[in-house]
Each structure stands twice: as structure tokens, then as C-alpha cells.
Image (spheres, rainbow, N blue to C red):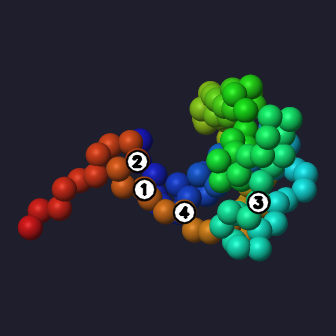
Amino acid sequence: MSMDRKSAEKLAKALALACVRNGFLEELHCGKGVQSKTGDYSDVAVITPDGEIAWNELSRINDDEMKQLMQEVVNKLYTVLLNMESREFMSALMTLSGRYTTQWDKAKELQGFVLPKKKSVK
């Protein structure tokens, strides 16, 4: 299966928006943000009944939340893959994405993401 770079970028953004961003991740993201005067959050801590935890040592998502997030992403990606041949489904997905991703950064191809990086020949 081959795809031109422009179409691949549009599809990647559509999948990221529909399958990852819009859903449980948004619930995890909502709430008050943490401010840091140092910029590296070394000046931020969370106080718990068991004591203080430095922000940089704090897990920001628990196991149940991670499981819920990943199951939602898998289910959404599975649904997209099962409907890739449906023009109506894919058109709706791409239309939804087009409304929200126009200001996102340009996609970058990651070398070594699944397959090892190719060694350069000198």
C-alpha cells in the first residue's frame, strides 16, 4: 500500500484527531494547568497523604486510565481500518479533521520507528 506524502499527512492528522485527541485523552487533559517559574517544573510538587512528590517524578496517568485510553484508541483505529473502503466514512473523517488540524505542525516521517534505521552507504 503506497500513499503520497500529502495524503499520508492528512490521514495521519485525521487519525490523531479522531482516534487519540478527541476522547478520553481530552478528559485527562482538562482541568487546571501547572505553572513553573523555572520552566523545568523542578519548583513544582504535589502533596499527597503519603508525602510530597516532585512534579518530574510524578506519574500523571494511572494504570486504569492508561488502559482506558489505549482501549479507546485501539477501538477507534480498528473502526477506521474496517471502514477504509467506505467513501462516506473516510470523507466524514477527513472533513472533521480538516476543521481542526489546519494549524497543526507539519508531519515528519520518523526513521527507525518500526523498522531499524537504514545504514547510510559511503
Mark 1: which secondary structure?
loop
Q: In the rendered view, would you say 10 is above or below 1?
A: below
In the figure, is residue 109 to the left or right of 24?
A: left
Which amino acid is tagged 4?
Answer: Ala
Q: Residues within 10 Å of mark 3 (few under 14, many from 20)?
A: some
In this picture, residue 46 sits left or right of residue 94: right
* Nearer the camera: disc 2 or disc 4: 2
Residue at (19, 56) in percent of width and height: 119
Pick whichever of labels 3 and 2 is earlier in the sequence: 3
Observer-side mark, 1 or 4, equals 1
Instruction: Residue at 90% x, 56% y: name it.
Output: 32
**Separation of disc 2 and disc 4 at Cα?**
14 Å
Residue 110, given in percent of the width and then of the height, sits at 42, 56
Q: Do we see residue 99 in this rendering?
A: no
Alpha-carbon span between mark 3 and mark 4:
32 Å
Q: Residue 121 appears in which quarter of the rendering?
A: bottom left
Mark nearer the N terminus (2 vs 4): 4
Residue under pointer 4: 107
| Near-viewer residue (34 or 52) | 52
**On residue 80, which mark appears?**
none
Q: CA distance from mark 3 to mark 1?
A: 33 Å
Q: Amino acid at mark 2?
A: Phe
For residue 61, say whether it is visible.
Answer: yes
Labelled disc at residue 113:
2
Which residue bears the numbered disc 3?
A: 44
Residue 110: numbered disc: 1
Give the mark toward the camera: 3 or 2.
Answer: 3
